[in-house]
Amino acid sequence: MKIVCLDVATLGNYNFSVFEKFGEVKLYDVTENKEQVIDRLKDADVAMTNKVVIDKEVMNSCPKLKLILETATGLNNIDVDYAKEKDIIVKNVAGYSTMSVVQHTFALIFAFLNYIPYYDQWVKDGKWCKSPIFTDFSRILTSMEGKKHGIIGLGSIGKEVAKISKAFGAKIYYYSTSGANKNSEFDCLELDELLKICDIVSIHAPLNNKTINLLHLEKLKLLKDNAVLINVGRGGIINELDLAKIIDEKDIRVGLDVLEREPMVENHPLLKIKNKENLIITPHVAWASKDAVDTLMSRVYENLEEWIKNGK
């Protein structure tokens, strides 16, 4: 059996040697175009992909392909319907990064509430050395206690965020992007009301027809002064051109781990804002703790093992 992983670089330093018990393992850090995909999978029995597209053309060009292992949850990079027609099994992994994303959510929230980037630079610039007192009040820290935290998307990650935020003393509200999610523990609000009243708004929703461009300029204008907006869901939920504009017009603080296009494009409007202190961007790393990657790949291993044993 030949097993090919098309984008090893997206999985950190994971050791793939455990897969060698099943056959030959071929690893590629990145696969940049369809020609490479076809060339690398042309004699493969099993393909592993995180973000590399495996479409109808690829499948038709790779007659030995029997199994596609998605090293993520989303399957938008695979033509699942055509794979079914071709009797190619497709298996993904869900729920492996919940706590990793939750942790990153609070890392971004607390970075703003406690002014971590500001004070880190303040000390390194030597300003504490010159201070006449032991502390500093050039920025005023605030606690989560008593804050109103609005959660957009109350799925598994959103619920964990709600639970932890509540433990810090915040009042939890949520907006169901599907309209189907009901939770008696927290107050459900319409989006406009949530944006108007909440001190913290965090996004934990998928990107779909109901969430694309959900927060455009008119919605962003509803945010309270000094509100904290976090997106660890999907890029495209927030209109990034409008966001760049509103950050320079309104006193809001924004933490992003996802963008509409990844990697970030050069000359992105968010790189040109004036109020740079009010924006933190991390490169889609919320999911990628060592624990999460290890859990992900152990389940990919189990998916492969199950297919070998049971053909499904």
Image (tube, rainbow, N blue to C red):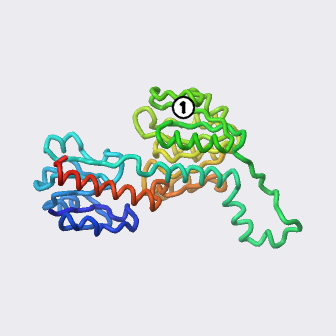
Residue found at the far right of this picture = 132
At 46% from the left edge and 56% from the top edge, which residue is drawn? 264
Horizontal and vertical percent position of residue 206: 43, 40
The kind of residue on which mark 1 rests is Tyr
Assign a secondary structure to mark 1.
strand
At 67% from the left edge and 39% from the top edge, which residue is drawn? 170
Residue found at the far left of this picture = 63
Residue found at the far front of this picture = 309
Horizontal and vertical percent position of residue 27: 27, 67
Task: From the viewer's perspective, tell me whether residue 188 is left or right of residue 237.
Answer: right
Query: How many numbered marks have been drawn onto this rendered protein structure?
Result: 1
At 57% from the left edge and 44% from the top edge, which residue is drawn? 243
Q: Is residue 243 above or below residue 296?
A: above
Horizontal and vertical percent position of residue 38: 18, 58
> Circle 1 is placed at which residue position?
175
Task: From the viewer's perspective, tell me whether residue 270 is left or right of residue 289.
Answer: right
Q: Residues within 10 Å of mark 1 (few under 14, many from 20)?
A: many
Q: Quadrant of the N terminus?
A: bottom left
Q: Is residue 81 above or below residue 99?
A: above
Horizontal and vertical percent position of residue 308: 18, 54
Quadrant in which residue 302 is drawn:
bottom left
At 55% from the left edge and 55% from the top edge, which residue is drawn? 281
